[in-house]
Amino acid sequence: MSTPHIYDAVIVGAGYGGLGQGAQLTRDGQDNFLILEAAEQIGGVWRDNNYPGAACDTQALIYCYSYFLNLDVSCMYAGRDEMLGYLLALAKAFDLDEHIRLNTRVTEARWDEERALWEFHTAAGETILGRTFIGAWGQLSQPKIPDFPGLESFEGESFHSAEWRHDVPLEGRRVAVIGNAASAVQFVPEVAKVAAHLTVFQRSANYILPRNQVVFTEEERKEFHENPDSYRAIRTEIHEMREAGIERTRQGTEAAEEGVQQALEHLRNQVNDPELVEKLTPTFAFGCKRILRSDEFYPTFNRENVSLETTAIEEITPRGIRTTDGVLHECDVIIFGTGFHSQAFQGELAITGRGGVDLKERWGSTPEAYLGMAVDGFPNLFLLYGPNTNLNHHSVVAMLEAQDRYISQAIAHLRAHPDQPLDVDSSVLRAFAEKTQADLQKSAFSADCSSWYKNADGVVINNWSGNVAEYHDLTRTLNLTDYGVTA
């Protein structure tokens, strides 16, 4: 019987995080790794979210890796197809296809203490062995539809925006959209153009800033390719502006008040009806929820075929949506813009660490990880875009790049010292988590609002507490003593 191959690293997920990690390993001369992807194509959220109007709501020039610039970008806020194209180009540039296995769903990952390996089981019954386990499914990969009473009884069509039904015609039909956050502000204007009538059900208003789209000329795009430093100069300017923007996410700052005024001015300039302006005005601290950018969302409510409904939903009936005031809003199609299971950091698989401990049980309702990556009792496991690594003020790709470099150091160490598993010291994780939560108390993320950043107890478990530079400083070097390893 042949000896099973042991990979230095097994990466689960082929979106921005997984592909970036693969590219970093390739850059570092490491080639014994495998990327497992459940779908039939790479791309992660940029593969899945193909709704009308889908685009990057962060400037695309900073939503790419510093070593692989998105020089083909056509505009500042690039559309979904361009973003997916960037990931396909990234995979090609670093020959990642030879490391990627598509249509491979991992159902279980189990730590083997005796062999100091992770054992992966797939839906097809295959077993794969890896020294290091990298979870790259992110925070926004599992669509969430609230359990509305009567949902099953609806006689029309319904779907989540991340699972868009392009086979369902919207032209001339009565459409209801539940939700009004990041995805909705992009697809609602597009749906309004074709629907006979569109009703948007809003639980709470959001702060929306102008997007001010910039379309690059043919000459500018040519210059990007011929002189990448011209691209880097704009990228650096945006980076510095966005880094300074963290002040807007801190409670009681002048910058936060400036953000409020900018958002309200944007609203008042774009919506004609004073009553609608009032309904679309947020009542919570700036930055408590995700700050959005759009130039098209607000004007949509000036259309005669669009209604905004702020009364709470009581139930869904065969013919539509009944609100708590007893009104039945009849519709033919319901589109859920209701976000994701953003706190399912263990993904869709069972993860078992030392002593048979399940990661979901280890975490309970408050997922935590050292530097957002490592969890005590789960040796050689590193999460990309894990707990407390999301950003409100900047590009999360900047966080991923720092994580990729850190994890690559860990993989190199384990390749040279397979008998020294990296299990973060519990006291190190505890000190990091306590400081992070203390710092978050100063941020708007901890203010009084309901957001996907918090768990049911109000603890902010998704967002990072500082800026990008601070995170890069913390993750620049793998400190083996954090993992109980002495040189």
Image (tube, rainbow, N blue to C red):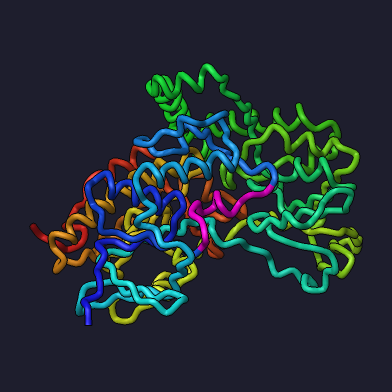
Where is residue 125 shown, x and y percent of the image?
Answer: 42, 79
Quarter containing the C terminus: bottom left
Q: Quadrant of residue 235?
A: top left
Q: Is residue 477 left or right of residue 162?
A: left
Q: Quadrant of residue 315?
A: bottom right
- 378 or 31, which is in the foreground? 31
User: Quick check: 354 above or below 324?
Assistant: below
User: Quick check: 160 above or below 220?
Assistant: below
Quarter containing the N terminus: bottom left
| Furthest residue in direction top, as rendered | 219
Q: Which residues are magenta?
A: 39-51
- 174 or 241, which is in the foreground? 174
Q: Of helix, strand and loop, which mostly describes the magenta segment? A: loop
Q: Is residue 308 left or right of residue 419?
A: right
Q: Residue at x 55, y 39 (%)?
A: 82
Residue 417 counted in the magenta span:
no
User: Quick check: 315 above or below 407?
Assistant: below
Evaluate whether residue 274 shows in this view: yes
Where is residue 27 shown, x and y percent of the image?
Answer: 27, 44
Where is residue 25 shown, x and y percent of the image?
Answer: 28, 50
Q: Residue at x 82, y 73 (%)?
A: 153
Q: Residue at x 76, y 62 (%)?
A: 158
